Image (cartoon, rainbow, N blue to C red):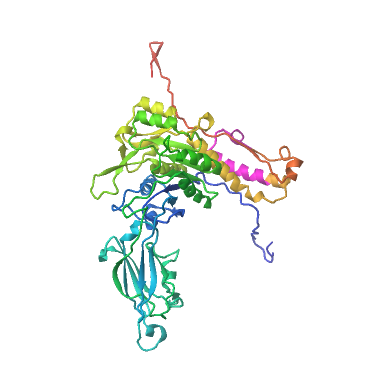
Amino acid sequence: MPVLTRPGVYVDESAFPTYLAATPGTAAAAFVGQCPRGPLMVPTAVSSWRDFTQSFGGFETKYPPSPLHLAVFSYFSAGGTSAVVVRMTTSTAAPVASSLVLDDQGTSVQPTLNITAASPGQWGNDLYIDITPGSLSQSAQSGQPQGQVLSFNIIVKYQGTQPANVVETWQNVSMNPTSSQAGLNNYAPSVINSSFNGSKYIRVTAAPGNTNNPPQNNPAAVSNQPLLGGLDGPGSPPAPPPTPNFNDYLLACQLLDQFPDQQFVLNLCGTYDTPSQNIIGNLVQQYVEPRGNIFLVADPPPGYGFDQVKSWAQALTFRSSVAAVYYPQVIVADPYSPQLGQTRIVPPGGFVVGTYIATDTSRGVAKAPAGLTTSLGGVYGVEPTGILTNDQQGTLNQINVNCLIPIPGYGVVVWGARTMSEYVVTQYVPVSRTLIYLSTEFVSLTRFAVFEPNDYVLWGSITSVLNQFLSGFWQSGGLQGLTAGDAYYVLCDSSINTVQSIQAGIVNVEVGVALQYPAEFVVIKIGQWAGGQSVSVST
């Protein structure tokens, strides 16, 4: 309570829960897959394609095309805004980082600085290091007559040794842990390994056992020294990484549990289920469904025609309301080719996930991410085997495969919004995702109730919070109903909170919602009136 001393308006802040309705659409994208470069088995948040390339590199033609890069690039092209990326490894053979050991400039030469690539993989074999004298001298620090140079510069080059290949320069660093420049510590490992503004290409550590005193333990000058030994998999480069199995994918996806309250739309980059390899089906059953706030977008195998994709889809085991399949693969400008006009066929998952997030932002989670407004930016067409007739689209739609079709004037659009669920009530993507959204928000909004006295005061608070949230969600179009009473109800009172449940420490809350269902079929009946007679016209 503020001290009231003069006339005026006073604000008293308290610890009451904040009753604010969340904005519809709070999901983020998640991509799990293999790529040549980047943090390994570390969930990394990115907010743009440029942000992604800072950690994972761009489209580098020296290495095989990366499904992870193609999916994330597609995602941001389709309007995606934020994502969590996991570069996964395999249990059979993890990538190995390139490295280099530099000797010092002492009278008795000793190893002084270990340099490794910032992330494992053969990409690090394309790193080169220059060491040059720094400008920090003894007189500059102590005011004594000009003496020996106390600092050195590290110049990092990538994919070549020419000046144009310089990607980073670290000036006036030292091997003295107590050294400083302009009041800031300039110890090389502290500066270069900083998680905030450190190197995107290398990591450095002091070599153990060096007995020379600073600055004699600074590395001697070298030019174009390569890092060596980087591997993507077993054998010599350019051996490809091993194919991951289900346990590899499960471990990689479980890293998303570092964000337990975050809703994700997940895509497994370059992974397709087959009867002999049921990775996605097992992952849905053992991870996606139990977690409760993840929706999975599955890609079809490349090159499948109508008959093949029909048989493939009918054999899928993940009959789940939290997974959807999109067909066919799409044609884009080849980002790996330096020649204009070259195209590449890529999985649709990245574009579809981007459409989910963009639709959430513009219309809310209750709007189906499909229709004429979902033109996929950057997509030229669908793979030749994926061009479908109306009858073929209808057949695939009935087995819950969502089609991507070209429509003149609109481009390639998403023309389906079905989950893999066998039940009518959860067969639509927006219905399933709305349930995920609501359950996640309910948990967040009622967390304040934990350890509060379990009585009518708490029940009233919970009812007020949820009513306010659902009112905003209904008014934004997320629920059906002409009135709030038609759209939702919240029940939290003595009728469902008995003496026994109170003594057991349980608060029971019952919520009913009238969900929005998409207009998947528009039926128009036309009658012709001529000369006083009704003439039927087939449509």
Q: Quadrant of the N terminus?
A: bottom right
Residue at the extreme right of the image, as rendered: 499
How far across and how far down the image is residue 334, in percent?
28, 46
Q: Vertical placement of 140 versus 17: above or below?
A: below
Residue 277 appears in the picture as rendered? yes
Of residues 159 and 57, the one nearer the viewer is 159
Q: Vertical placement of 3 versus 385: above or below?
A: below
Of residues 3 and 493, the one nearer the viewer is 493
How far across and how far down the image is residue 23, in percent?
52, 46
Quarter where residue 500 is shown: top right
Q: Vertical placement of 92 versus 524: above or below?
A: below
In the image, is 428 to the left or to the right of 38? right
Count of numbered marks: 0
Q: Main secondary structure of the magenta part?
A: helix
Q: Is residue 488 magenta?
A: yes
Q: Quadrant of the C terminus?
A: top left
Residue at the image point whose x is 63% and y is 52% from the top: 17
Residue at the extreme front of the image, as rendered: 235
How far across and how far down the image is residue 170, in percent?
36, 70
How far across and how far down the image is residue 3, in percent?
69, 65
In the image, is 262 to the left or to the right of 69? right
Of residues 348 and 280, the one nearer the viewer is 280
Quarter where residue 408 is shown: top left
Residue at the extreme bottom of the image, as rendered: 145
Q: Is residue 119 magenta?
A: no
In the image, is 473 to the left or to the right of 451? left
Of residues 337 and 354, the one nearer the viewer is 337
Question: What stretch of residues is rendered in magenta?
Answer: 461-489
Residue 357 appears in the picture as rendered? no
